[in-house]
Every structure is written in structure tokens, then in C-alpha cells.
Image: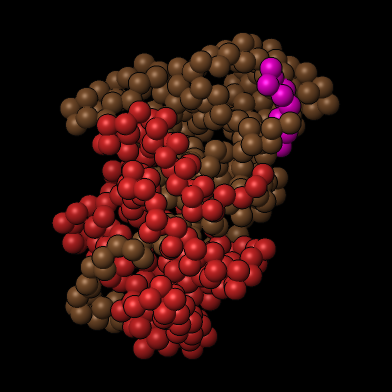
Amino acid sequence: MDRSSNHPAYELLAAYSAGSLPLSQALCVSAHLEHCHSCTRQLQRLNRVGSELMQQLKPAKASNDLKNRLLDSLDSLTDEAPAEQPKRFDPSIPRCLHQFVDQGYAELPWKRVSTDIHSVELCRDNNGAKVELLKIRPGGSATTHTHLGDEYTVILEGSFSDESGLYKQGDFVVKDARDRHTPVATQDRECICLAVTEGPIQFTGFFSRLLNPLIRRGYA
Amino acid sequence: MTAMSNRQSSSEKLIALGACISRVAKERDKSAFAELFDHYAPQIRAYSLAREPGADLVADELVQEVMTRVWLKAEKYNASLANLNTWIFTLARNCRIDYLRRNGRYVSEIDPTDLFNDMEDEGPGPFQLAQQSRAEASIREGLRQLPREQSEVLTKVYLEGKSHQQASEELKLPLGTVKSRVRLALKKLEVLVER
């Protein structure tokens, strides 16, 4: 079996390491990393590439004024959130999702999509991508679907299979708009996934960017 | 200078800087902090200017953010996980993402804070320091030998902070070509882990 299909592609991890990946995709990569030792190792190496690239830049002198201001401020610095009581999170929930899920998956306002599927939207990214959790009942199927853009999925609990294979906890799956697939949850338990679906269209020009909110609204 | 003595001096420099960070962590030593500033502030400014040429105030602000974190998090720095240069890079990257978000250029509802934990509070990884510095020297050498079109995409993605999509628009290349050039470059640098 081709294990590489259950991990983010190298160039995607590189973009994550560079900090240039859209945050919605970074969320999926981050959720995957908590489960994947080899991608974590890969990331450490990619960070080194970033570090070496940074060191190759021609240094841009910093003023003494900046240095002195910083040195003067050191005594008054405190870590922003030291006293905050660390909340008890369900350890099975990836850390990057704590900002959306603080009490466990069961407490979320799930909405019924079909007999087999419930979903809850977590947020939108600035590129219009929709970030949601999907819950498929044991043995349930997500009807054959295609997407308008790429779809990124990370399995958080349970497992599912589709035409290309079996996916289990932590697996990272990318499907592009051409892929038609029918995911089916395994019989033993329900399957919960983090899913990021890209918006239909993304404008990046200055004037056309103003249209984006209108388009996004249409993409509900 | 030969490549060998170059490597020698940069690893000696790194050892000296490593001593500074531990003095900052253990003794709250401001002169050690000043040494770190002298070495890293110009790099951090260059990194910021690579994304926004001419934006000197933004660059100064990034220095301030990163060096503040260095002061506050020095204790958490773990030399067995990443060398100091790499740690500074990840801090600079994280601060840059925060900055862009705070200033509305990244109008995302996603808080990046917990997305890039890297090595801030995780236990030691599988890497040994000696192995690491060898890897760094070979990445450095590899970068020097990359074909221009491959180093160009790495620069876009890592230093200018461009998404693959933006890189493809700016370089007038198909998206797939951008991705495959990144992959080829990483392969040449011999940094890919077997899966």
C-alpha cells in the first residue's frame, strides 16, 4: 500500500514550514502532525531549510535605537498568559482544534446533513475555504460527491474507506475537484473528520478582491 | 575562505550563541541577550524585508516581537530538538504570521497560535546535535548548488511568504510546476524522510 497517500505531500509540508500555507490547510497539517512521527521529523528538516535560507539573506543592519529600546524594556516584559489556568482538554482532540472544540466533539452543535452525516462548521479562512467537522455514523456513507476546489480531510476518530483505500486516525487525505469518491465509515464506530473545502473561486487582484465577500456569501 | 573553514567558523559562532541563550535562560543576562540581538536582528530584518521590501518599520517590529520571545522563552529552547538558528527561524515565521493576522492582511478566523507549536514545549526529538550540524552544513552546500529555477521557488515560498498559488502567478508558471520544483529542490537538498 502506498503510505505516502495518507500524508501531506512534501511541498505542502514545506509551505507549512515556511508559514505560507493558508491557515485552513495549516490546521489540517497540524492535526496530522500530532499523529505522525515521520512528518514531524520531516518538518524539523524543512525548518532547517528555512533557517539556512534566512541565513543566506544579506543582513539588514538594526539601529542602536531599536536595540536600546528593547534592552530597556526587558525588565517589564512578562509572558502574556502565565497565570491562566490550563484548561483540561480531551487529549484525543488535536491541540490546534482547541480553539474550536473545548469540551469534546459530543458538545458541538451538530447539524444533520443526511441520515448518515452530521456536520458542524468551525470557521472560514480568508481564502473562502470552509472548515468543518464531519461525523459519519458507523457503516454510513457520504454520498458520491465532487468538490469545486480541493478538499483536505484529516481523520480524527474512527476510520473510513473509499475507492482508493482505508483511512484511519491521523490520516491526511487530499481530493481535488476531479476526484469523485464515496467515503464509507467502518462498521465498528462513528467516524469524525476535519474537512477543509476550498471556495469555488478566489480572486487575488485588488479590485476583484472586493468581490470576494459577495462570492463567499453565495457559497454557504 | 575555504568551505571547510567557513563551516568551522559558523559552527563556532553557533556554539558561542548557544552559550548566550543559556546565559539568558539561567541568569537573565542582558549582555548575552545583546550579543544575540547583534547577531540575529539583522537576519530577522532581512527576512521581513524579503517579504515587504522597504518596510523598515515592519522589519523593526518583527525584530522586537521575535527578540521579546527569545527573552521570554529562552528557558524553553531545547538544543536537542533544533539548533538555535532554526529556533529563531521558527519564531520569526510564527511572529510574521501573527503580525499579518493582527494587521488585517490575513483576515482569517483561525488563530495560528496553536498551529505551529514546533518545539516550544515538546520533549526531545530523535535527533542528536552532531547529526544535526552535519545536516545543516549539507543543506547549506546543497542550496548553493541548486539550479536557479529551484532556488527561486524556495525563496518565494520561504522568504517572501508566497503561497504556491501566488508563486505560480508571479513566476508565470503552472501551479503544478511550482509544486514539482519545490519537491525537486527538497530532493536535491536530501532532506526528504522515507515514509
Residue drawn at x 29%, y 20% is A214
A21 vs B80, left or right, is left
Q: Which quadrant holds the N terminus of chain A?
A: top right
Q: Please, what is the dominant secondary structure of the magenta stretch? A: strand
- Which sits in the foreground, B104 or B37? B37
Q: Colour of chain B?
A: red
Above or below, B63 against A100 in this view is below
Q: Colour of chain A?
A: brown
Residue B60, quarter of picture = bottom left
The x and y percentages for residue A137 are 73, 21
Q: Which residues are magenta?
A: A160-169
Residue B117 makes an appearance in the image: no
- Which sits in the foreground, A187 or A100? A187
Residue drawn at x 35%, y 83% is B35
The x and y percentages for residue B23 are 48, 86
A107 vs A185, left or right, is left
Above or below, A50 against A1 in this view is below
Q: Is-magenta flag for residue A163? A: yes
- Which sits in the foreground, A27 or A115? A27
Residue drawn at x 45%, y 36% is B180
Q: How is the image coloured?
A: by chain
Q: Which quadrant holds the C terminus of chain A?
A: top left
The x and y percentages for residue B38 are 31, 79
Name the residue at the right extreme.
Answer: A188
Name the residue at the front extreme.
Answer: B2
Q: Is-magenta flag for residue B153? A: no
- Which sits in the foreground, A151 or A112? A151
